[in-house]
Image (cartoon, grey):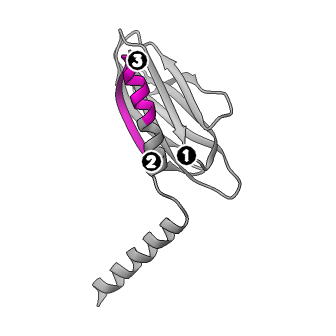
Amino acid sequence: MNKFLLIGVFLLISLFSFSQDLSMKSIMNDVNEIISAVESQGSEVVKVEFDIVSTDVKVSYRVLSPGWYYSIGVLGDYRSEDMDVEVYKQKSDGTYEFVVSDTKVSDYAVVYVSPTESAWYKFVIKCYKFKPGYTACHYGLIVVHE
């Protein structure tokens, strides 16, 4: 009996999600197009991440190495109006220092980093503004080096 209740709940959730058009497919398709364009220019995608962000922030990490020029991009789906990304470099004491952030108002953000040494970098992803009627959106994070 409990199995049927659980299945029913999952079906209701999936029906509600579908009827609200909350699929991640649109952001995945958008990021796929960006990856194709980046790779056709000879650059290499080294990290891709998808998630949902609401009024909180999301954090992602990656080691960036010297000798590479990195582009860090964040793209919001149709529910976002202002996506931003902040980049921090880990110091020897384990704390992070600010490196760069995106300041324009747009549903995407792009910043650039040219490390002088190999270190962990923290990417803070924010949606400062949602389109009317929304309080969350999917995002895609793309890290590219050339």
Could you tell me how far apart the alpha carbons at marks 1 and 3 are, in whole angstroms?
24 Å
Label 1: which secondary element = loop
Q: Earlier in the sequence, mark 2 or mark 1?
A: 2
Let me know if residue 108 is in the magenta part: no
Let me know if residue 39 is in the magenta part: yes
Residue 17 location (% of width, % of height)? 49, 66
In the picture of the structure, the residue carrying the numbered disc 1 is 77
Residue 7 location (% of width, % of height)? 33, 79
Judge from the rendering whether residue 1 lies leftward or rightward of residue 126; answer left or right: left
Q: Tell me the kind of residue under disc 2.
A: Asp
Q: Residue at x 58, y 34 (%)?
A: 108
User: Mark number for residue 51?
Assistant: 2
Residue range in magenta is 33-50
In the picture of the structure, the residue carrying the numbered disc 3 is 41
Residue 2 location (% of width, % of height)? 30, 86
Q: Tell me the kind of residue under disc 1.
A: Asp
Q: Residue at x 38, y 81 (%)?
A: 8
Judge from the rendering whether residue 3 lies leftward or rightward of residue 26; answer left or right: left
Q: Earlier in the sequence, mark 1 or mark 3?
A: 3
Label 3: which secondary element = loop
CA neighbours of label 1 inside 10 A, class few (<14), some (14 to 19), many (20+)? many
Nearer the observer, disc 2 or disc 3? 3
Q: Tell me the kind of residue under disc 3.
A: Gln
